Amino acid sequence: MRARNSISALLTATSLLATVGAVAAPASASSRALGDTLKVGGLINLQNQLNGGSGGYLEIYTTSTAPGASYTVDTTPTDRGSNTATWRVVSASGRPQGSAVRSGDAIYLVNAYSTGNFYLDVNTYQDRPAAWWDVSVTTTKNRDGDSGKWRITAETSNPVDGVVRSGDKIHLESLYEGNGGFLDINGLGGPGYDVSTTTYWDRNGNGTATWKVLTK
């Protein structure tokens, strides 16, 4: 009886260890639950949908020389770590923390690198073909009017109720001067592509201004 109890205890302990290991294992980008509601205050990656998803993840890369800017913004083929490709969603219209982000909402995107608040921002003209504003991050959410404010618009979701979810494809429109263009990749930059805005929501017909939301 004592041996049987010892075996039972060992099996129980092994089961508990397996359960703890499963909970503690970090979720990869491919294993995240698609369909999770995007919430105010939530952390996300944004994957550019060039040719179906090969445009890389939106990230900060190196020190920017643009006036008032902190870091340049490019894309990276993989999340390089240190939260450079992680962004926190902040409501620009006063929606409370934890509430659902809806298609058409005005938001700020704050990079999660280090302890600073680095807001996604349009700053200076970009001279690449069909580009409008260069994109960087700054420590001030409204550095120049609404230069750090963006409208998030989903192409669709499931269910079709206006809420944005993980896995949805979206467009981000700068609200600078009322219309600062759509967040877009255009030419090589950093470890992937340079990021700027464009007047077209599908500039080349291959998804350069489309981004997939991946909640973390």
Image (cartoon, rainbow, N blue to C red):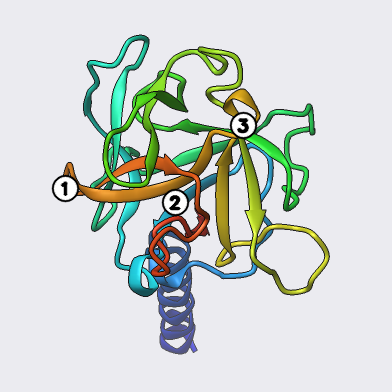
Label 2 SS: strand
Provide the residue designation for mark 1: 191
Amino acid identity at mark 1: Pro
Instruction: Please give the name of the residue rendered at 36% of the width and 46% of the height, measured from the top-left corner.
Output: 130
Residue 158: percent from the left, percent from the top? Answer: 72, 74
Instruction: Please indicate whether residue 65 sits to the left or right of residue 17 in the image.
Output: left
Q: Of label 3 and label 2, which has the lower sequence position?
A: 2
Residue 143: percent from the left, percent from the top? Answer: 51, 12
Label 3 SS: loop
Q: Quarter of the image holding residue 73?
A: top left
Q: Nearer the viewer, residue 76 or 148?
A: 148
Amino acid identity at mark 2: Asn
Residue 97: percent from the left, percent from the top? Answer: 73, 34
Q: Nearer the viewer, residue 70 or 40?
A: 70
**Is residue 2 shown above or below 158?**
below
**Is residue 156 shown above or below 70?**
below
Instruction: Please indicate whether residue 159 sits to the left or right of residue 189 in the image.
Output: right
C-alpha distance separating marks 1 and 3: 27 Å
Provide the residue designation for mark 3: 175
Q: Nearer the viewer, residue 16 or 143?
A: 143
Label 1 SS: loop
Amino acid identity at mark 3: Leu
Callout 2–callout 1 Cβ contact below 8 Å: no
Provide the residue designation for mark 2: 45
- The crowd level at tag 3 (other Cα within 10 Å; few <14, some 14-19, many 20+) is many
